[in-house]
Image (cartoon, helix red, strand yellow):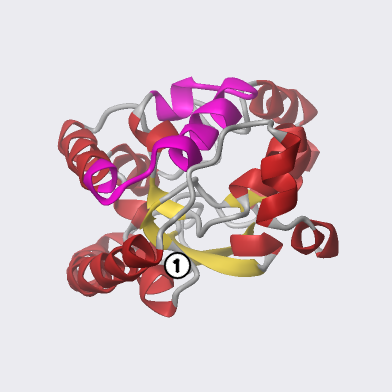
Amino acid sequence: MEVFEDASSSELEEDKLVELKKFSHREIIIKRGIDILGGLAGSGLFLIAAALLYIPYKMSSKKDQGPMFYKQKRYGKNGKIFYILKFRTMIINAEEYLELHPDVKSKYHDNGNKLENDPRVTKIGSFIRQHSIDELPQFINVLKGDMSLVGPRPILLFEAEEYGERLPYLLMCKPGITGYWTTHGRSKVLFPERADLELYYLQYHSIKHDIKLLALTIGQIINGSDAY
């Protein structure tokens, strides 16, 4: 983690891997205000979803039963590790399943750490993922300040090497519930193209741009597109 914190924004700007657009003081204040308002509204939706999903989770088959929520370590701003919150969509010990099934593990990594027909996803989990309901608990992360509504997606610890020299740039700002990669292909776009799409946000971000990406995300959720 220390290596990420050692790279200052000025040093990264000198490297010229990308032409960074700085966040103005005004933009930071407005963005945080929108995050708080959006986080409060989203947390209300999260509580409603949790109430509606409680019985389906309890009535699921023995193979699919387990905790309703799932937390996972991700990289946040400046490489700080935090726990992202999600509705659980996979079987218990999903990571162990990959170790026991090397053929599935190989396809998983070859496909950018995603599988369109992942055998670990539960029946209720498939529906939840299609409509991005599994992301609703992350509004709690937004209120806590770990995340923003819009930004590069929070990076899994084992994905760090996939980003290569782009990683320090992506860790300059808070990760987001949605962002440019999320709204422009999402699961269909693999590394290294995914990293380039995430970097696009740091070059062209603005409050207007954030609002546009949020609107695109709502459309995706309604249509259930590009998510698996």
| Residue range (magenta) | 185-210
Is residue 159 on the magenta stretch? Answer: no
| Crowd band around label 1 with a 10 angstrom C-alpha radius: few (<14), some (14–19), many (20+) | few
| Residue closest to the eye, 205 or 108 | 205
202 within the magenta span? yes
Question: In the image, residue 127 lies at what x, y percent?
Answer: 29, 41
How many labels sit on residues?
A: 1
Q: Is residue 40 above or below residue 26?
A: below
Q: Which residue is mark 1?
A: 69
Quadrant placement of the C terminus: top left
Judge by depth and name the residue closer to the eye, 154 or 87: 154
Q: Residue at x 40, y 66 (%)?
A: 25
Residue 159 appears anywhere in the view: no
Magenta stretch prevailing secondary structure: helix
Choose top left, top right, bottom left or bottom right for residue 2.
bottom right
168 shown above or below 87: above
Residue 163 left/right relative to 24: right
Occupied quadrant, residue 201: top left
* Secondary structure state at the residue bearing disc 1: strand
Query: Between residues 221 and 19, which one lies in front from this camera angle?
Result: 19
Given the image, on which type of amino acid does mark 1 rest? Phe
Instruction: Examine the rendered structure and indicate whether residue 104 appears above or below residue 157.
Output: above
